[in-house]
Image: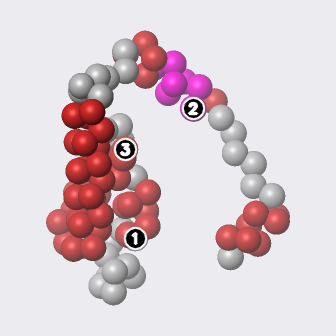
Amino acid sequence: MSCGDPHETDCREVLAEVYLYLDLECAQERRTLIRHHLDECGPCLREYGIEQEVRALVARCCGNESAPDELRERLRVRLSELVVFETTESRELAD
């Protein structure tokens, strides 16, 4: 259940991946799932639109510069090596 209507994918999950979707940095399967959700969920589509506008503003201010491919690859490798530890205390706070 999300946004008051049943969806195949939870809104929180979709909105958490909006930047990956905008940057084309998620698998095609996830892109399809997110696009389908956005097509049927007005509140998420509005949120996506806001994110899209913010990215366009940043691009205009930064001259549409993009990171070099080598930097993007190094970041992906480093991020894939990160390990997140969850303590019992942090789980209790989340509940």
Is 37 on the left-hand or right-hand side of 73? left
Q: Are the two marked residues, 1 and 3, in contact with CB atoms closer than 8 angstroms?
A: no
Q: CA distance from mark 3 to mark 2?
A: 14 Å
* Residue 69 visible somewhere in the drawing: yes
Give the crowd class for mark 2: few <14, some 14-19, many >=20 residues within 10 Å: few
Amino acid type of the residue tagged 1 in the rendering: Asp
Q: Which one is earlier in the sequence, the residue at label 1 or at label 2?
A: 1
* Residue pointed to by mark 3: 20
Tell me the CA gap for discs 1 and 2: 25 Å
Q: Which residue position is annotated with label 2? A: 79
Looking at the image, residue 75 lies above or below residue 94: above
Identify residue type, mark 2.
Leu
Q: CA distance from mark 1 to mark 3?
A: 16 Å
Where residue 40 appears, as percent x and y from the top left, is 19, 72
Q: Tell me where the magenta segment starts and ends, as one range.
A: 73-79
Q: Residues within 10 Å of mark 3 (few under 14, many from 20)?
A: some
